[in-house]
Amino acid sequence: MKTIVLGADHGGFELKNIIKAHLENSGFTVIDVGTNSADSCDYPIFASRLCKKIQVGEAELGILVCGTGIGMSMAANKHKGIRAACCSDTFSARLTRLHNDANVLCLGARVLGAGLALDLVNEFVNAEFEGDRHIKRLSLIEDIENGKLVE
Ligand code: RB5
Protein backbone atom coordinates (compact mmCIF):
# COMPACT_ATOMS: atom_id res chain seq x y z
CA MET A 1 0.00 0.00 0.00
CA LYS A 2 1.16 3.52 -0.74
CA THR A 3 2.25 6.00 1.89
CA ILE A 4 0.28 9.22 1.61
CA VAL A 5 1.38 12.50 3.17
CA LEU A 6 -1.29 15.00 4.22
CA GLY A 7 -1.03 18.72 4.89
CA ALA A 8 -3.40 21.60 5.46
CA ASP A 9 -3.74 25.16 6.70
CA HIS A 10 -6.33 26.41 9.20
CA GLY A 11 -8.99 26.43 6.43
CA GLY A 12 -8.38 22.79 5.58
CA PHE A 13 -7.33 20.96 8.74
CA GLU A 14 -10.79 19.58 9.57
CA LEU A 15 -11.19 18.05 6.11
CA LYS A 16 -7.57 16.85 6.25
CA ASN A 17 -8.38 14.95 9.46
CA ILE A 18 -11.46 13.36 7.82
CA ILE A 19 -9.27 12.30 4.88
CA LYS A 20 -6.66 10.94 7.29
CA ALA A 21 -9.19 8.71 9.08
CA HIS A 22 -10.57 7.53 5.73
CA LEU A 23 -7.15 6.62 4.33
CA GLU A 24 -6.05 4.86 7.52
CA ASN A 25 -9.30 2.87 7.56
CA SER A 26 -8.59 1.92 3.93
CA GLY A 27 -5.17 0.50 4.90
CA PHE A 28 -2.87 3.31 3.74
CA THR A 29 0.05 4.54 5.81
CA VAL A 30 -0.43 8.26 6.45
CA ILE A 31 2.09 10.95 7.38
CA ASP A 32 0.51 14.14 8.72
CA VAL A 33 2.60 17.34 8.48
CA GLY A 34 -0.13 19.51 10.09
CA THR A 35 -1.60 21.95 10.75
CA ASN A 36 -3.85 20.66 13.50
CA SER A 37 -5.79 23.65 14.71
CA ALA A 38 -7.95 26.52 13.53
CA ASP A 39 -5.19 29.02 14.39
CA SER A 40 -4.33 31.10 11.34
CA CYS A 41 -1.19 29.85 9.57
CA ASP A 42 0.57 30.15 6.21
CA TYR A 43 -0.26 27.44 3.66
CA PRO A 44 3.08 27.60 1.74
CA ILE A 45 4.89 26.27 4.83
CA PHE A 46 2.70 23.17 4.96
CA ALA A 47 2.87 22.70 1.19
CA SER A 48 6.66 22.77 1.45
CA ARG A 49 6.79 20.31 4.36
CA LEU A 50 4.60 17.91 2.40
CA CYS A 51 6.53 18.24 -0.88
CA LYS A 52 9.81 17.49 0.89
CA LYS A 53 8.41 14.16 2.11
CA ILE A 54 7.69 13.20 -1.49
CA GLN A 55 11.01 14.52 -2.79
CA VAL A 56 12.99 12.36 -0.34
CA GLY A 57 10.82 9.30 -1.02
CA GLU A 58 9.10 9.05 2.37
CA ALA A 59 5.70 9.19 0.66
CA GLU A 60 4.53 8.45 -2.87
CA LEU A 61 1.52 10.76 -2.97
CA GLY A 62 0.35 13.84 -1.10
CA ILE A 63 -2.93 15.59 -0.41
CA LEU A 64 -3.02 19.27 0.53
CA VAL A 65 -6.12 21.05 1.80
CA CYS A 66 -6.67 24.79 2.15
CA GLY A 67 -9.75 26.97 1.68
CA THR A 68 -9.78 26.70 -2.11
CA GLY A 69 -6.93 24.29 -2.87
CA ILE A 70 -5.47 26.98 -5.12
CA GLY A 71 -2.81 28.51 -2.87
CA MET A 72 -1.60 25.03 -1.92
CA SER A 73 -1.32 24.01 -5.58
CA MET A 74 0.60 27.18 -6.47
CA ALA A 75 3.06 26.62 -3.63
CA ALA A 76 3.44 22.87 -4.25
CA ASN A 77 4.14 23.32 -7.97
CA LYS A 78 7.19 25.45 -7.16
CA HIS A 79 8.94 22.31 -5.85
CA LYS A 80 11.11 20.26 -8.17
CA GLY A 81 9.51 16.98 -9.18
CA ILE A 82 6.14 17.91 -7.75
CA ARG A 83 3.11 17.79 -10.01
CA ALA A 84 0.18 19.16 -8.01
CA ALA A 85 -3.40 19.24 -9.30
CA CYS A 86 -6.22 21.25 -7.75
CA CYS A 87 -9.39 19.25 -8.45
CA SER A 88 -13.06 19.47 -7.62
CA ASP A 89 -14.43 16.69 -9.85
CA THR A 90 -13.73 12.97 -9.79
CA PHE A 91 -12.86 12.73 -13.50
CA SER A 92 -10.00 15.22 -13.14
CA ALA A 93 -8.80 13.61 -9.91
CA ARG A 94 -8.45 10.26 -11.74
CA LEU A 95 -7.10 11.62 -15.04
CA THR A 96 -4.43 13.71 -13.39
CA ARG A 97 -2.92 10.43 -12.11
CA LEU A 98 -3.42 8.56 -15.41
CA HIS A 99 -2.08 11.28 -17.73
CA ASN A 100 -0.10 13.78 -15.65
CA ASP A 101 1.31 11.40 -13.03
CA ALA A 102 0.28 14.03 -10.49
CA ASN A 103 1.82 13.26 -7.12
CA VAL A 104 -0.13 15.85 -5.10
CA LEU A 105 -3.88 16.43 -5.00
CA CYS A 106 -5.03 19.83 -3.73
CA LEU A 107 -8.53 20.25 -2.35
CA GLY A 108 -10.60 23.24 -1.26
CA ALA A 109 -12.36 22.67 2.05
CA ARG A 110 -14.55 25.72 1.38
CA VAL A 111 -15.41 24.40 -2.08
CA LEU A 112 -16.11 20.70 -1.47
CA GLY A 113 -18.31 18.75 0.92
CA ALA A 114 -16.56 15.92 2.77
CA GLY A 115 -18.39 13.24 0.74
CA LEU A 116 -17.19 14.56 -2.61
CA ALA A 117 -13.71 15.21 -1.22
CA LEU A 118 -13.39 11.54 -0.19
CA ASP A 119 -14.54 10.45 -3.66
CA LEU A 120 -11.79 12.61 -5.19
CA VAL A 121 -9.27 11.12 -2.77
CA ASN A 122 -10.32 7.56 -3.71
CA GLU A 123 -9.98 8.28 -7.43
CA PHE A 124 -6.58 9.88 -6.93
CA VAL A 125 -4.93 7.31 -4.67
CA ASN A 126 -6.23 4.27 -6.56
CA ALA A 127 -5.35 5.36 -10.12
CA GLU A 128 -1.98 4.62 -11.73
CA PHE A 129 -0.03 6.60 -14.33
CA GLU A 130 -0.54 5.18 -17.84
CA GLY A 131 2.95 6.06 -19.08
CA ASP A 132 3.20 5.69 -22.86
CA ARG A 133 2.69 8.97 -24.79
CA HIS A 134 2.41 10.92 -21.54
CA ILE A 135 6.02 10.26 -20.56
CA LYS A 136 7.40 12.64 -23.20
CA ARG A 137 5.02 15.39 -22.06
CA LEU A 138 6.14 15.04 -18.48
CA SER A 139 9.75 15.27 -19.55
CA LEU A 140 8.86 18.53 -21.35
CA ILE A 141 7.43 19.82 -18.08
CA GLU A 142 10.70 18.81 -16.45
CA ASP A 143 12.56 20.79 -19.13
CA ILE A 144 10.50 23.86 -18.22
CA GLU A 145 11.33 23.24 -14.55
CA ASN A 146 15.03 23.18 -15.46
CA GLY A 147 14.79 26.34 -17.58
CA LYS A 148 15.60 24.38 -20.75
CA LEU A 149 12.49 24.61 -22.92
CA VAL A 150 12.76 27.51 -25.36
CA GLU A 151 10.45 27.25 -28.37
C1 RB5 B 1 -6.88 31.15 4.06
O1 RB5 B 1 -7.77 32.13 4.47
C2 RB5 B 1 -7.04 30.91 2.56
O2 RB5 B 1 -6.54 31.99 1.86
C3 RB5 B 1 -6.35 29.63 2.18
O3 RB5 B 1 -6.89 28.58 2.91
C4 RB5 B 1 -6.45 29.21 0.74
O4 RB5 B 1 -7.74 29.22 0.28
C5 RB5 B 1 -5.51 29.83 -0.22
O5 RB5 B 1 -5.48 29.53 -1.40
Image: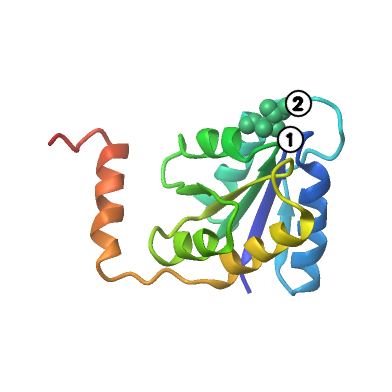
Residue 77: image x %, image y %? Answer: 47, 39
Q: Amino acid at mark 2?
A: Cys
Q: Mark 2, residues whose alpha carbon is within 10 Å: few (<14), some, or many (≥20)?
A: some
Q: Residue at x 23, y 59 (%)?
A: 136
Side of 40 where 82 appears, left or right: left
For the residues labelled 1 and 2, say whether their Cβ atoms are less than 8 Å apart: yes
Q: CA distance from mark 1 to mark 2?
A: 6 Å
Q: Quadrant of residue 99?
A: bottom left
Q: Residue at x 47, y 56 (%)?
A: 102
Q: Which residue in the structure is indicated by mark 2?
A: 41
Residue 33 drawn above or below residue 115: above
Side of 92 where 69 appears, left or right: right
Q: Amino acid at mark 1?
A: Asp
Residue 122 drawn above or below residue 75: below
Side of 103 where 13 appears, left or right: right
* Image quadrant where one finds the N terminus: bottom right
- Residue 43 showing in the rendered view: no
* Image quadrant where one finds the C terminus: top left
Dot 2: element: loop
Residue 62: image x %, image y %? Answer: 60, 53
* Total numbered labels: 2
Dot 1: element: loop
Query: Which is nearer the N-term, disc 1 or disc 2?
Result: 1
Cβ of mark 1 under 8 Å from ligand 1: the answer is yes
Residue 12: image x %, image y %? Answer: 75, 41
Residue 70: image x %, image y %? Answer: 57, 36
Query: Camera-side residue: 80 or 151?
Result: 151
Q: Which residue in the structure is indicated by mark 1?
A: 9
